[in-house]
Amino acid sequence: MAPAICSRNPFVSTRAEPAKSLTLAEKQWYHKLIFNGVEGELTTEKKALIFDVQRYSVHDGPGIRTLVFFKGCPLRCKWCQNPESISKQREIAFFSNKCIGCGECAKACPKGAITFEGPGRINRSLCDRCGKCTETCYAEALVTVGKEYAVSDLLDVVERDRPFYRQSGGGVTVSGGEPTAQFSFLLDFLKAAKAADLHTVMETCGSCAWSKLEQLLPYLDLIHFDLKIIDAKAHRRHTGAGNRSILTNARKLVESSANMVFRVPLVPGMTATSENVLDIIDLLSEFEHDRIHLLPYHKMGESKLERIDSTLEPLNLEPLSDEDVAAIKVQFEAAGISVLIGGG
Ligand code: SF4
Ligand code: SF4
């Protein structure tokens, strides 16, 4: 069975350090590359807040891939499977099933933000996300979500699986969140990745300035572009933002012959309505674009909401049946659009 929307990343501890580091000479080479030959200290290199790096993925582009999840997203989709990606800031997640009630976090917290009342552990109105509680929580019930990486550090992690990429035709996929929300770092990272001869894929919601997307194009081998809802009002109602720039960017990418695949999350009553499916078929026909990925909704991301005290409400919808998904697939195929269920 192909994967649904994405089961990509549980919250992970940010304590793990890379097993292997680039040599100083390699770091200096990347640094020169990134700064166009200008000498400088490595500490001046740009940094990005990344909330997960997932190795050995086979669903987010060709071959075996390393997925890099950027923090921050301009949308706020009701069905978001990575709610920890939405905020641009570092967050503290609480896993109630791991808490042993030792109280060490309360002793460590300088803000008096630890509470033992209610299901959570943190009074978010007092917490400044300093992370001191996570350092003392040996049960790993409190975990920091979001870790800063410099370009060379991220490449260091991605490079570890180069033998797998070579054998499988894989590479690195930047995802999120919305990777373009940390544009300056992203551009440098993709430049360095291409200079290191890595295959690059970007998963994007498409909500960013065209001038930014245009700059990224020379360094992207493939774009996975999310098409959610075509009707502007419904898009705003279910994602918290308009879709004008998204549709404009989709059109411009097609016109510039970018190698891209549109992906549609199938959320009952939101994106998987008969009107929206027809609207998307019409748009792809107008674009003369003949392939799409359909990503059926699942509930797996909703358990993450209470860990970060998200203000998003769990949808708790029943996923579409296999028959319903198959019927939508047939609609696209009848319009000459080939369909892959799940990522790929
Ligand atoms: S330190 Fe961790 S395990 Fe101990 S009470 Fe706090 S959250 Fe629970
Ligand atoms: S992150 Fe800092 S302020 Fe927030 S609960 Fe933990 S120790 Fe307290």
Image (cartoon, rainbow, N blue to C red):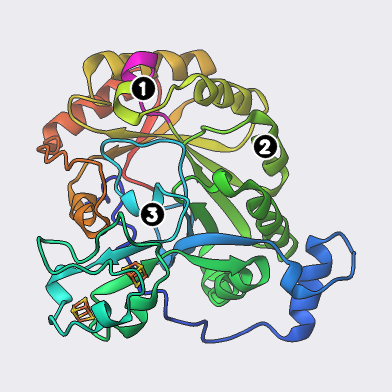
> What is the distance, in whole Å, between disc 3 and disc 1 at their CAs?
28 Å
- Estimate the spatial distance between the alpha carbons at disc 1 and disc 2, rounded to whole Å: 23 Å
Q: Is residue 167 left or right of residue 101?
A: right
- Residue 177, above or below 141: above
**Label 3 Cα neighbours within 10 Å, binned few <14 / some 14-19 / many ≥20:** some
Amino acid type shown at disc 2: Lys
SS at mark 1 in the image: helix
Compared across the picture, whether 89 is left or right of 93 comes to right
11 or 333: which is nearer to us?
Answer: 11
Q: Which residues are magenta?
A: 227-235
Is residue 64 visible in this depiction of the protein?
no
**Label 3 – label 2 distance at C-alpha:** 26 Å
Query: Can residue 248 be seen?
Result: yes
- Mark 1, Cα crowd under 10 Å, few <14 / some 14-19 / many 20+, is some
- Position of residue 188 in the picture relative to residue 136 (left or right): right
Q: Earlier in the sequence, mark 3 or mark 2?
A: 3
Seen at 13% across and 80% down, the residue is 101
Badge 2 element: helix
> Circle 3 sits in a helix, a strand or a loop, which is it?
loop
Q: First in sequence: mark 3 or mark 1?
A: 3
On the image, the x and y values in percent for residue 121 come to 20, 66
Does 249 appear in magenta? no
Q: Which mark is residue 236?
A: 1
Q: Report if the beta carbon of the residue with label 1 is closer than 8 angstroms to ligand 2.
A: no
- Structural crowding at the residue carrying mark 2, measured as other residues with C-alpha within 10 Å and reported as few (<14), some (14–19) or many (≥20): few
Q: Amino acid at mark 3?
A: His
Q: Residue at x 40, y 62 (%)?
A: 128
Q: State the residue position of label 3.
A: 59
Which residue has dot 2 on it?
212
Does the magenta segment cover residue 230?
A: yes
Residue 12 position (above or below residue 290): below
Quarter-of-image position of residue 29? bottom right
